Amino acid sequence: MEKTMNKLIRIIGLAIVGLFSALLVANSVFANEVNVFSARHYDSDVQLYKKFTSKTGIKVNVVSGKDKALQKRIKEEGKDSKADIYITADAGRLGAFQAEGMFQKGASSAAIKKVVPANFRSPNWVGIAKRARIIYYNPKTVNPSWNMSYEDLADPKYKGRVVIRKSSNIYNQSLVASLIKNNGEKNTAAWAKGMVNNFARKPTGNDRAQILAVAAGEADWAVANTYYLALMLSGKKGAEQQAAAKKVMPFFPNQDGRGTHMNISGGGILKHAPNKANAVKLLEFLLTPEAQQHIVNNTFEYPMIPGVKANKLIAQFGLDFKQDLKTKVSNYGKLQAKALKVMNEAGW
Amino acid sequence: MIKRINFWVIFAFLVPLLVAIPIFTVFLSFFDATGNYLDLLTDTFLLKYLSNSFLILLGVLSLTFIFGVTSAYFVSFYKFPGVNFFKWALILSFAVPAYIYAYSLVAFFENYGTAFSILTFLFGEGDYNKNIPKFDGLIGSMFSISFSLFGYVYVLTRASFIFQSHNLIEVGKNLGLSSYESFFKIILPSARPAIVVGLSLVAMETLSDFGTVDFFSISTLTTAIYNAWISFDDLTTANQLSFILLFFILLLFVLENLSRKGAKYHQNSKGNKPIPKIQLVGGKSIFATCFCSILFFCSFIFPVSQMTYWTIKFPKYFQDINFWSLNINTLILVFLSSLFLITFSFMTNYGNRVSKNKIISYLSTFSVSGYALPGIILAVAFITFISWFSDLLSSIFGFNSFKNVFIGSIVGLVIAYFVRFFSLSYNGIKSGYSKINNSIDENAYLLGYSKFKTFTTIHLPYLRTNILLVGVLIALEIIKELPITLILRPFNFETFATKAYSYAAQDLLEAAAFPSLCLIIWASIFILFISKYILSEK
Amino acid sequence: MSSNFLEIINATFVASKKNKIDNVSLTIKEKGEIVCLLGPSGVGKTTILRTIAGLQDLKSGVINLKGKTISSENFNLEPEKRNIAMCFQDNSLFPHFNVLENINIGAKRKNGSKFNYSDKDLIKILHLEDIQEKYPHQISSGEAQRVSLARSLFSRPDLLLLDEPFANIDTSLKEELQKKIKDILKEFNITTIIVTHDSHEAFFMADKCGILLDQALKQYDIPYNIHHEPSSLEVAKFLNRGVFVDVKVVETDCAVHSLSHPILGEIRGKLVNNFPAGSKVKLLLQPEDLRHDDQSKLKLEVVDRKFRGTNFIYTLKTSSDEKIPVFVHSHHIHQHQKSEKFGIKTPIFIDHLVCF
């Protein structure tokens, strides 16, 4: 019995040593730090955080992952969560997370309020960069009138000429949510059916694949976010795609009415953030001209603050289009579930 | 029985019990009241999700059957140019995870993709997009999963062919069967148990796939569970859906187990000489070589070339990657997980052996179905369970919360891997133990060896090949593992798999190429390391 | 506690649900005694050894070794702590060690008794020189059995248990080995329990023999007594060297007792069990009991003849159809064909009259 006990102790000891060494690797604790849970996967964000660290001495720890999984982790960790900031690329998600009470007030500090338009922030979260979800067309085959709208894409005359990605995509959900907000659920359901009738193919691929489908002549119209075109034009995806992107023109819809659908990447300070002061500092830093310039040059999003110019690859298509500032982005979260239902019922 | 309780038996009871917790949870909550997500599901998507899962499963099973059995048949019975090369080259397909295969597939066939570049390079500028075949996500998922999993069917079927009784085939010849007839009437039926085992492994992996179907945005039963849980916070529905999934998979388990028993019956143990291989000539020989070449090309060369091409074409991304830390992180996970898995699998197996207790044995059998829980579901279940348990202990005993020890730490990752891959490890060690007669242990005790010493001096050396095999299989799984790592990893922690995923998520598959390639190379090294055991003809 | 070396008290051994051995009591008084348990296969001999070794639980009763309880109804000392070695009937060598390594692995017992032979000596004694580098799957089952024996001996146990140790060994080698092993066991005073179904082996090896029949230990005595004074009809039948004939007890008062058989006539000798004069009993007739005598008036018909090299065993038939075996040396004067008459020396004298 004694021998067995000794062995048991030895094995448990070994296991504990193993656990602790693993813990050391995992939780190298820095006193001055800020912890970011990010659903944005950009490497350029990480470079930006490094700039922040060299400036302030505050270490930035990052976990990136799928939106909802990160949220789940934050929720379950509860008051023990080490996460300070949650960053994601959709206003609807920020709103929904806020509705669950997971953010604390203070994201929009005085400095931030000064530079960020009210539509793109709330007491709980703040936008970091903007993107528009726009229409792309093939200039060789079609020519949109200046006041063309998202609503027009459901016109039967475009039958078999429209491509867009699946209904499960959050950007689509936010777009349709804004349509529901502006036109009502019933009209939007009819619109969704019209869209599905106009599909050139079963929805497949990401936003870039939709633009490429127009370039390849599979369709005349595509709906996709702005930065995808710039990404291709930048040559980061190779010469062929750069050439392909030049065959496609972006179009900013609803200029006659409420303006083009805007969405944001944004972040908020979490309820149980252990490093709130540092978190505020990081958010403020992300909204400085220096950081904004870094973001727009790498991700090709639109800057959130005035005085910073979008990258020329995106700026060349015009910066003075009418943005939909009327539809509060905070509505997206509330209506996304309805939007998904509408799309699914239409067979999207 | 009380007389026989000892250290080992306690482990044999506790380890499977812990592993079985997530599965118990799923079973117990099946009879709870349903949540609203289920109503939504049944109204709109459930049928769609089920049919997607079913279609993918059907497609993958058909393809892996054709790929695996045909190639195994050629390399086991015939000589043709390259046969010795294909014999092991075909198992390299294990090194390519389905999601990386999916990246390659999309990159190659998309508008203005690699195929377009090649055609442009060969024939000059032109509008080739129309001529490049397009397929939707469902077909893409089927092919990606099939090419990365057909190896299971190939390896098991081949082993069964090799060990098939020579006599059986000769009898067939004496009865005047053509090679076509003898294949369908004798060879195939007698290899059926092995094929079923292979296919059920494929089926389990297919049903629990997340990376591939997520990349193609195909909603399946697994994504439905994930959504129910994570988007709608509807644990009950998630569990009920998981129950359907588990039910399917347990069915497969039963099927597989039955076949395994059959396989024993079919195997002719003594005096088995390798079957002399027949030289193929002419058209048949060309066909066999072509079939194997195409299979090898599609399953391995194609994704590797695509990834290599990008790595070279976009060297900028190559520099962005912290290569060494990725290597170290991946290896730490592999090392810790295999260490714990193998150690505890040994203890559980030995405990089972020592106790001869039926309850413990059933518990072990039950717990290995942890393999059936998709990784992504397991990861979420893990977070939920740990926080519930931590809160419970805090409220009762006033402990400090220990959530941070388990969530977002290497410890948590290793434990989650443990639950997921315990089946693999436990069964691997078990198959080794089944070769050690019980009287060997008794002899050791009678020579004065304690249980621990019997273990170290007798079992460990005897099972070293098994340990190697199991260790490498765990390593392969962990190198390729994506959802668990993604959800449970610590801050600033990347593996090749998460890095590749992260680039794919920001639509930079070009940048995902290098980590993907590293992942494939690591996995290939491990595969080559054990290929001689997998392909043994003795 | 008494000072007996091994005590088995009122023990019930359970082999399977149906098969058990009840109420066994058996004592080995001195260290170094060799005990053989003799019984037909399937009676549970191996179960007894396994239980003594601690590999199986004792159902009821007590087993004490050197004054300490090692097994009882609710206690079971781990087998590795008993210092008992056991040689299994089937091959149970460690497959990943060669013969020499297998033997040496036994030497690591910490509290073993004194043992002066080296591994090489044992290899020589057991004729294992040629195979010492080989692996278990490369040797025959007889060789494996000898290796296993060497391994057990080399582990210097307090108590050695041998399960049919010579079962797979060639007849030519068997007797030589039996002697050598007995010598070793005696030289080093190793207490041994041997299980066998071969009474010759048991009688040769054992200081004491136990007969296991019908789920019980029927008799436990020195081999001479077992042979000459079997305690019951069953034991005598099991030892199987003769037939029972019906006789009547005539005279029991004198030093020499006398019985009468209607055909064989008067049979004299000493009754093992006492019966009053006039009782009708069954007498055990063993082949060695009757003598050949061509001159005798008592002649019986030969119905069978077995030639066994040095001797013949004839089966004779009496007029009342009793078949009687007779043992004679293999010599031309003893040659008789079937259905010839065979003379038996009268009066018949048998040292031990075993009657029931």
Image (tube, rainbow, N blue to C red):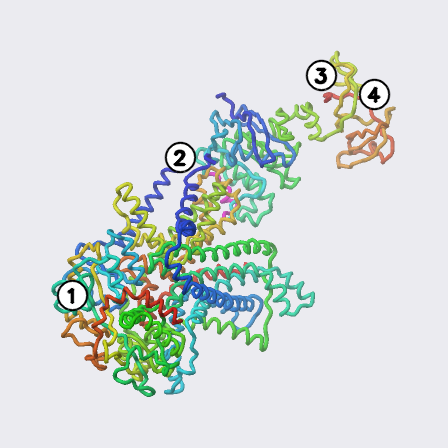
Q: What stretch is highlighted in magenta?
A: C96-107
Residue in the image at 60% along x and 64% along y: B187
Q: Separation of disc 2 and disc 1 at Cα?
A: 63 Å
Give the numbered dot on residue A1: 2
Q: Mark 3 points at which residue?
A: C274
Instruction: Identify the element where label 1 is drawn.
Output: helix
Q: Main secondary structure of the magenta part?
A: helix
Residue C101 falls inside the magenta stretch? yes
Q: Separation of disc 2 and disc 4 at Cα?
A: 71 Å
Q: Are tags 1 and 4 found on a single chain?
A: no
Residue type of the residue flagged with mark 4: Gly
Q: In this view, does C25 lie to the left or right of B248?
A: right
Mark 4 / mark 3, whichever is N-terminal: 4
Give the numbered dot on residue C265: 4
Mark 2 / mark 1, whichever is N-terminal: 2
Q: Are tags 2 and 4 found on a single chain?
A: no
Q: Are tags 4 and 3 found on a single chain?
A: yes
The nearer-to-camera label among 2 and 4 is 2
Of A116 and C18, the residue lying toward us: A116
Q: Separation of disc 3 and disc 1 at Cα?
A: 116 Å
The nearer-to-camera label among 4 and 3 is 3
Is the residue under label 1 in contact with that under label 3 (CB below 8 Å)? no
Q: Please say if C266 is above or below B113.
A: above
